[in-house]
Image (cartoon, rainbow, N blue to C red):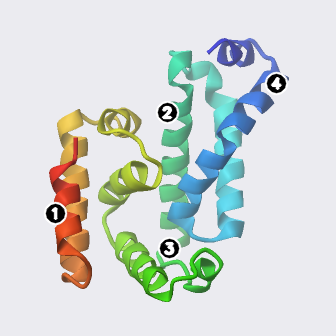
Amino acid sequence: MERVKEVQRGNSLAFESLIRKEQDKIYRIIFAYVQNEGDAIEVYQQVVLRAFEKIDQLKEPAYYSTWMIRIAINLSITYMKKRNREQAVAPEVFSSLETDEKLMDERIDLWQALQTLPNHYKTALLLRYYHDYTVPQIAEIVELPIGTAKTHIRRGLQALRKQLKGAYNDEWAKSVEENVE
């Protein structure tokens, strides 16, 4: 929190330190939207520039991390709209991550289904299940009431289950929906 205040007073070295602390999380969020390393780097650079230009407008330094995530999500969505490039991640991306072929196929199917969801559902699910944010944190990031964040998670999960048509463990999907806090 003190470091944010230092940046707001003009200390650019403090800004570099803040960015380093958040860079992996921000990059992963961006990549989830743009699904291409080159595009993710480009959007990441835009996020850093936007944050540097606007940090003096951040009223509550304690919300710096949330503020950065919001910038990353907004710029990622804008970038995708401009580029009109909504496509799923190529299966080769996962080949180095998984050795179990069945598990890899399930993850690819899930990822492709996730990419077809409306952005508000996709954002809620990515934050909840890929980044382990709590529902109140998600509500804060997307600037919605907690109940609406819960609804986005639940409806996103329902849409995924419907889209995957029970190909995978429906019991798991139902238990996840019931545990949306």
The residue lying at 56 percent from left, 17 percent from top is 61
* Upstream in sequence: badge 2 or badge 3: 2
Mark 1 or 2: in front is: 1
Work out whether 100 lies above or below 114: below
Compared with 85, 148 (above or below) is: above
Q: CA gap, disc 2 to disc 4?
A: 20 Å
Residue placed under numbered mark 3 in the picture: 84
| Residue at 32% in and 36% down | 139
Amino acid type at image mark 2 = Thr
Mark in the foreground, 2 or 3: 2
Q: Amino acid at mark 4?
A: Ser
What residue is pinned by disc 4? 12
Quick one: label 3 or label 1, which is nearer the N terminus? 3
Distance of label 3 from label 4 (alpha carbons) = 35 Å
**Which mark is nearer the camera, 3 or 1?**
1
Q: CA distance from mark 2 to mark 3?
A: 27 Å
Q: Quadrant of residue 135?
A: top left
Query: Mark 3 or mark 4: which comes first in sequence?
Result: 4
**Which amino acid, by three-letter code, is at mark 1?**
Lys
Estimate the spatial distance between the alpha carbons at disc 1 and disc 2, rounded to whole Å.
Answer: 29 Å
Q: Is residue 23 left or right of residue 111?
A: right
The spot of residue 23 in percent (x, y) is 68, 44
Query: According to the image, label 2 marks what residue?
Result: 66
- Disc 3/disc 1 C-alpha distance (Å): 33 Å
